[in-house]
Amino acid sequence: MPHGEAATAESFRSARVRRFLVAALVFAALALSPLAIRSVYLQNVLVLTLLYAAVSQSWNILGGYCGQISLGHGLYFGIGAYATSVLFVTWGILPWGGMIVGGVLAVAVALLIGYPCFRLQGHYFAIATLVIAQSGLVLMQNWDFVGAARGIQWPFGPDSWWTLQFARAKTPYIEVSLALLVASWLATVLIGESRWGYWWRAVKDDALAAESLGVEVFRSKMAAAGVSAFFTAVGGGVYAAFLAYIDPDAVMSFRFSLLFALPAVLGGIGTPWGPLVGAAVLVPLGEFSRSYLGGSGSGLDLVIYGALVMAVALARPQGLLSLVPRRRAAP
Amino acid sequence: MSGAAILELASVSKRFEGLVANSEVSFSVAEGEILGLIGPNGAGKSTLFSLIAGALVPTAGTIRFAGADITALPAPERCRQGIGRTFQVPRSFDSMSVLENVMVGSFVRSSSSSAARAKAAAVLEFVGLAPRAASFAGALTPPEKRRLEVARALATEPKLLLLDEVLAGLTPAEARAGVDLVRAIRARGITVVMVEHVMEIVMPLVDRAVVLDIGRVLAVGSPAEVVRNEAVIAAYLGERHRAA
Ligand SMILES: Nc1ncnc2c1ncn2[C@@H]1O[C@H](COP(=O)(O)OP(=O)(O)O)[C@@H](O)[C@H]1O
Ligand SMILES: [Mg+2]
């Protein structure tokens, strides 16, 4: 095998071109998929699959690349959903703007949480995120200005891309969810091949060794947390527009925090395609089991998810994607 | 050969709860030299490296690097200032390729990925790991992992390189290649402090040696002086007797 600087640069360039070509094909196929999938039920499943893939990809930036396992991403999702809904319903600010506001708010909250937590060792971060997200849920259930437990109903209006409201059509939500997936995929891959990406993975693999090589461990975690929270909150905004009704349990309960982590873990944690692969298995499975085996209240879908993830964790710790043969490790 | 002091330790101590790992350690390292840090197991050599590199904070004493007090600086800052180190038990980034491991080091000096990649490839060539560039670090053999440790640290362009038992457990041929590598590193103008357990390997290589025993400096001097030192002989014989 040839090596040396020129050969290394060349093999990196060709692997990169391959990666972006594959991505273009996959995303183009998904964009055209509503032409083939006509059933409203299946289109609904597709919206959710793409949305969970996008948010799980966002989770993956912090959890998979930087190794900081969050069990509270439902909080950022909720912040995005609430910011988008409150701004639209109360002040008529279009959801596109609301999503960005929600994203910025979520970044601020993520940094506030990270500031004390990222200095701690071990599993404190996971536990802290879980506790803080649950506190956020209780806060929203009791905060009258945002409708408390009653939630917020979006006003009925004509179908419009401006307000992202469509009474029947699912295709717009498929395209918007896909756009978010593409954005979070691009962020993951582009930041992943920059210095930040290398720092994140070094922090995940061995923080002590990373520090000896000049890696700013704390700043790396904060940056990953911020990027991750931003895209998660935008996902919450899209979800709120899709439902046109939100309440605390519908957008920020613990099951969301779990459902953002699971696809990445199942598909391949810390890989750019893991979240989509995982979501493509988990979300349809959950939806079908809900349709055929009973309502969402039973939590049966969560039991099935849990069992599936356990099985994969035991048999294939690297996730489903590791079943795909690879040429060799990317240089 | 030896210029001004690049590293100066003044009464550096490190205490872990009850245990004193380093006690009042004082010596300096001249620019451009290869200094051996030797002593029996548990003497406090690796701990001292961690104090110099900033992974641990000394309980007392000061550490000066290139004339400035660095005792309070965090590890990444010391790396930027030019202190590189390897770990006795290799700590490779096992989810990354060998090349990517080294790139983490080269990002200290360049924020561009392609520059970091080119630099890492050149360093791998230098240490003889280039054929393994695309392998996962986790798949390396133990001697290769040691080389990777060295490559990563070299990629940060250190002025001072701390090598912790990089020659331990190698076959004689591998150890000779390792010795050549250390000489080549010094030839690049990098000051080297190396921990080695085995006197036979390290003595012909170093300009001076510092002997540590139970955390304190037992002797400092040329290899010839050190091996004749009564206290050193006693410490080593003592260890041989314990080991036997
Ligand atoms: N993190 C630590 N906590 C407690 N004791 C430690 C720690 N690191 C090293 N020690 C102790 O300090 C002493 C010196 O260890 P070390 O520096 O690894 O010695 P050497 O590298 O010379 O073999 C040993 O007794 C070791 O058990
Ligand atoms: Mg040691």
Image: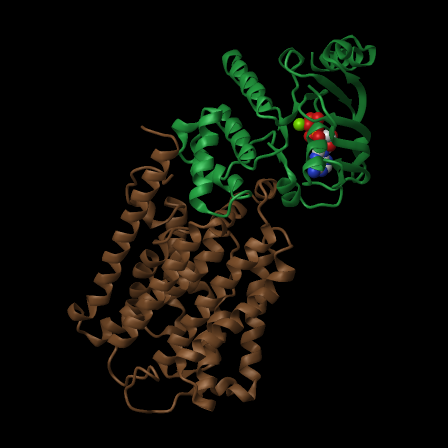
Chain colours: A brown, B green
Coordinates of residue A89 in the picture (x, y in percent): 44, 89
Q: Residue at x 29, y 38 (%)?
A: A327
In the picture, measured across the screen, residue A136 lies left or right of residue B232, that is: left
Q: Nearer the viewer, residue A12 or B235?
A: A12
Q: Residue at x 34, y 57 (%)?
A: A278
Coordinates of residue A244 in the picture (x, y in percent): 37, 84
Quadrant in the rendering for residue B89? top right
Residue B169, visible in the rendered structure: no
Q: Quadrant of the C terminus of chain A?
A: top left
Quadrant in the rendering for residue A42? bottom left
Coordinates of residue A232 in the picture (x, y in percent): 44, 67
Position above or below: A269 against A106:
above
Coordinates of residue A21 in the picture (x, y in percent): 25, 52
Q: Nearer the viewer, residue A286 or B18?
A: B18
Ligand 2 image-quadrant field? top right
Q: Residue at x 47, y 90 (%)?
A: A90
In the picture, measured across the screen, residue B153 lies left or right of residue B15, that is: left
Position above or below: B238 against A224:
above
Position above or below: A44 against B133:
below
Residue B208, visible in the rendered structure: yes
Tally of numbered tags: 0
Q: Quadrant of the N terminus of chain A?
A: top left
Q: Residue at x 36, y 36 (%)?
A: A8
